[in-house]
Amino acid sequence: PGAPGFWREFLVGMLKPVAATPLVAMAVALSFTQRLGLEGEMLYAMARAFLQLSVIGFVLQFIFTQKSAAWILLAYLFMVTVAGYTAGQRARHVPGGKHIAAVSILAGTSVTMALLVALRVFPFTPRYIIPVAGMMVGNAMTVTGVTMKKLREDVGMQRGVVETALALGATPRQATARQVRRSLVIALSPVIDNAKTVGLIALPGAMTGLIMGGASPLEAIQLQIVVMNMLMGASTV
């Protein structure tokens, strides 16, 4: 950031995001005319997204220039912490829900990431690991949150069945096995459906970014296949 011309280049580059703001104004105007009452929330969400992305851009710019693996691990743990907190919010009445969510996300994504690095699919550098980890953590966060919410609802609705199983000597894991399976199936369904329709309905983000960055479509689909595989693995684990 201290390099000559950095700020000028940054400000010139921000002209494109600013040029896209009329789209937000259109959405706000439609919300107002239809009396949806979402104008304030829309403006807040976009302002927050602008601020968060700007800050993370500077943070990544700094991390990418560092050679220490500690920065990669720190960024990864930060993402897992935020994701665990967010997923845990879906099951606020579950004791230790945020910690359970964070550990689940950490387990699934760390195992998948370790395999990708060990198999030399991606080099262990910030430019590769942080974006890939972000995709995995975000996807695992959604699956974990939905699983916990649905499990809590199912156990609550079938409380009598669970209590009867416990009274007959079943362990808590055995008593809730059916509810756990049902919750996992529901949470993983969007991931599976997305894998089935990838490229047919819309081009995924990683593939789109590569193509817009100048990569050939064949190179883009190769990376996207890796991304779909890792998302499936991280979400299920």
Image (spheres, rainbow, N blue to C red):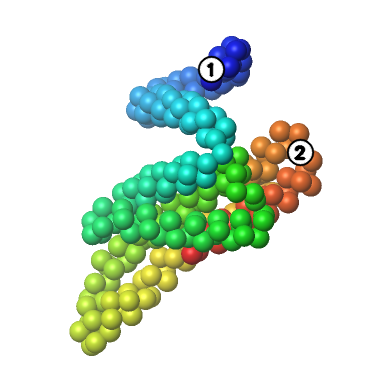
Kindly give the residue lying farthest to the bottom in the view shown. Answer: 168
Given residues 230 and 155, the one toward you in this image is 230
Q: In the rendered view, would you say 200 is above or below 150?
A: above
Residue located at (20% from left, 84% from top): 167
Q: Residues within 10 Å of mark 2 (few under 14, many from 20)?
A: few
Residue 2 bears which disc, if any? 1
Q: Is residue 169 left or right of residue 85?
A: left
Q: Residues within 10 Å of mark 1 (few under 14, many from 20)?
A: few
Q: Is residue 204 left or right of residue 138?
A: right
**Amino acid residing under circle 1:** Gly
Residue located at (65% from left, 51% from top): 122
Residue 203 bears which disc, if any? none
Q: In the rendered view, would you say 110 is above or below 85?
A: below
Given residues 29 and 143, the one toward you in this image is 143
Q: Secondary structure at mark 2?
A: loop
Question: Residue 211: in sight, yes or no?
Answer: yes
Query: Disc 2 marks which residue?
Result: 215
Nearer to us of marks 1 and 2 is 1
| Marks 1,2: beta carbons within 8 A | no
Q: How far across and down, in percent of the image, does residue 76 sit?
A: 47, 46
Residue located at (50% from left, 64% from top): 236
Report the number of discs: 2
Q: How far across and down, in percent of the image, does residue 160 sit?
A: 22, 76
Badge 1 or badge 2: first in the primary sequence? 1
**Amino acid residing under circle 2:** Ala
Picture quadrant where residue 202 is located:
top right
Kindly give the residue lying farthest to the front in the view shown. Answer: 68
Question: Residue 30: in sight, yes or no?
Answer: no
Q: Secondary structure at mark 1?
A: loop
Q: CA distance from mark 1 to mark 2?
A: 30 Å
Residue located at (45% from left, 20% from top): 29
